[in-house]
Amino acid sequence: MIISDEFFMDLAIKQAWKYSVLTYPNPSVGCVILDKNGALLSCQAHKKAGFLHAEPTAILFALFKLNEQIFFDFIKAYYDKFFVKFLSIKELEEYDLEPNFTYEFILENHSNLLKDAKAYVTLEPCTHHGKTPPCAGLFIQLNFKDVIISCMDFNNIASGGIALLKQHNINTKFGVCGEKGKQLIEPFLSWQKGNFSFLKLAISLNGVITGGVISNTLSRTHSHKLRDVSELLVIGGNTVRIDRPTLDTRLVENGKNPDVLIYSRQNDFDKNIPLFGVKDRKVFISNSLENLEKKLVMYEGGVGMLKLAFDSKIPNLKWILLYKSNELKYGENIKFKNSFRPIFESNFENDNYGWYEIN
Amino acid sequence: MIISDEFFMDLAIKQAWKYSVLTYPNPSVGCVILDKNGALLSCQAHKKAGFLHAEPTAILFALFKLNEQIFFDFIKAYYDKFFVKFLSIKELEEYDLEPNFTYEFILENHSNLLKDAKAYVTLEPCTHHGKTPPCAGLFIQLNFKDVIISCMDFNNIASGGIALLKQHNINTKFGVCGEKGKQLIEPFLSWQKGNFSFLKLAISLNGVITGGVISNTLSRTHSHKLRDVSELLVIGGNTVRIDRPTLDTRLVENGKNPDVLIYSRQNDFDKNIPLFGVKDRKVFISNSLENLEKKLVMYEGGVGMLKLAFDSKIPNLKWILLYKSNELKYGENIKFKNSFRPIFESNFENDNYGWYEIN
């Protein structure tokens, strides 16, 4: 393995992928920071809209790595302000840090430790003051020397980061792992233009997709997180009748239960099926998938839904999300001839999962 | 992701896994090198017995990274000596470098550039002069400051590396990712004790394992590399009759075609089946898998062989090697109820593959 700009950008991209789509309506972004001597300090990603951006998160952890006292000062200050106590750096890493407080903490405590540092960012750093202050400004105020960027921001409001960095004499390099960086933000580009739709499916090692739970708790938690951010859940009528699902977000804290569209010609569903009883949810029944007018739509289902996908009958369907268990399950496999092209693959403990395009 | 000793050791371990079993009879070893300031310079692994060890390989690439002139000097010297011309660093990385020449080149050209550097090695560096000079000595001669080791070497001939490093005032730390490091050398520990056996299987996304080629060229090349190092290939009689395989190593340059044991009660095989026609190969037919007296045995086959594995009827069977395509193939799936525990998973382009234990 050759160590190069591509190696570090790849780290940032892979970190960002973990939160793909979960950042809706924001793009997935990852950031890696090296100190002035080239030592790797941190690799972090944007996790969810409203959470700290990738760049200040990576900067915060870089400071922790350079000086442990800054970590202790941060957890003390955070406790004093919010009465939230972090017991470890791992715990802090998972937490939804208050963006403005954290940003201010960085500005007050960086002690010029990141002077001449180098950042790898998967997307051009933002220049606008949204829920969080602009990231390009942070690199400038901390006197970074180099900012390497994979992909331009196509969002007019937030773009201009490269120009601003250059104006402040920061060396910028653009297009490192550019194709990969662009693929990472495909969901973002799609919902910016109108809609991003994906189909989620869980499959056993021997190709069984029916007969109860297939994926593990971590996979299902990931799936619930995706439901939480989705504007609409579409499910096939047969799956509703046979599986009698709840389609809620019980594995996620304070999860939002999205409205459900049952794709069916009939509408004589047993209203005792749990999905109808979920609070604050509307359930629609329709035999059309056109003009849903939602920006992020998650499709769930079985063989029928997969057939629609293969027949290009799901409007705007971009990716398939597969959870693949390493278990052999008694039962019949799905009988199709087709293939998937992996875009990103990883695992949740013993399960594999990935985002795919239909080949 | 928190950057720590575990992060760098994990890089070394993952690099080593790419050559798991392929290093037979040597252990799989990976090595990461940071310069005195903590900058990541290289991550390399031992690829095959007789090839350069992981440590000098990582040191060579670390020197290339620190001073590009050393790279140019090396390719010139290599050409002058062996008439082999490298066109890129990537090409050189894949090549079977002559160990003694390379070792000497490092000693003559390091210019103390790695003084106070830090190495992460998945296994205690060797102290004996085998086909290649001892690795522990190289760290000493180049004045490394720290050598972090995941796992002790249980091989009496080569061990003693930690003691030697300490004796020369190199800081050593032992047990970083210790469990992972030990798992990496399980094949080595097994064949040291007598035998390591594994079963290779290719499976489509929907659980079909029959009906022609399932995995892609890279997966099959990997499989041929494993045949090349295996002492014996065992295959079920039914698979031989139905698939009429060649079981050679045509996808590998100068591959050795291992002897074949056909596991069958009958021995009336059509001798026109290609596997019988492979040069320099013995073919045995036996209804017993006991006392094969080989150190590395590769099992191939289909449903029958998998059933033997599940019923614990393959002696010393340690791991299952699965090539998993992302294609849906027409056909029936394998019908078992069982599960696999992933030990290492990665991919060959669009195929997934991994080493598994039966759960």
Image: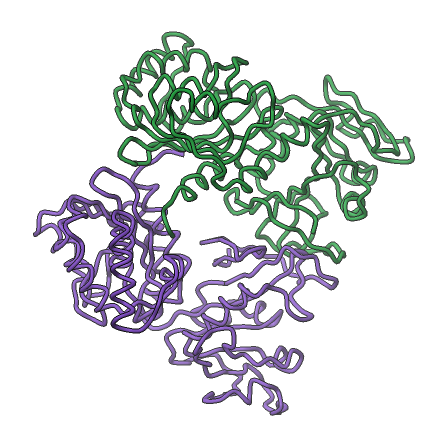
Chain colours: A purple, B green
Left or right: where A262 falls relative to A210 = left
Return the x and y of residue B275 as percentages of the image width and height: 75, 28
At a point 59% along the width and 49% down the height, the residue shown is B325
Rendered position, A311 above or below A280: above
Rendered position, A107 above or below A261: above
Res A71 → quadrant: bottom left
Return the x and y of residue B177 as percentages of the image width and height: 49, 42
At a point 9% along the width and 47% down the height, the residue shown is A169
At a point 26% along the width and 44% down the height, the residue shown is A34
Please tell me which residue lies in front, B52 or A268: B52
Name, please, the residue furthest toward the top: B81
Please tell me which residue lies in front, A346 or B11: B11
Return the x and y of residue B138 as percentages of the image width and height: 40, 18
Left or right: where A143 falls relative to B354 = left
Return the x and y of residue B205 as percentages of the image width and height: 62, 54
Please tell me which residue lies in front, A254 or A207: A254
At a point 48% along the width and 20% down the height, the residue shown is B52
Number of dots carrying numbers: 0
Res B22 → quadrant: top right
Res A127 → quadrant: bottom left
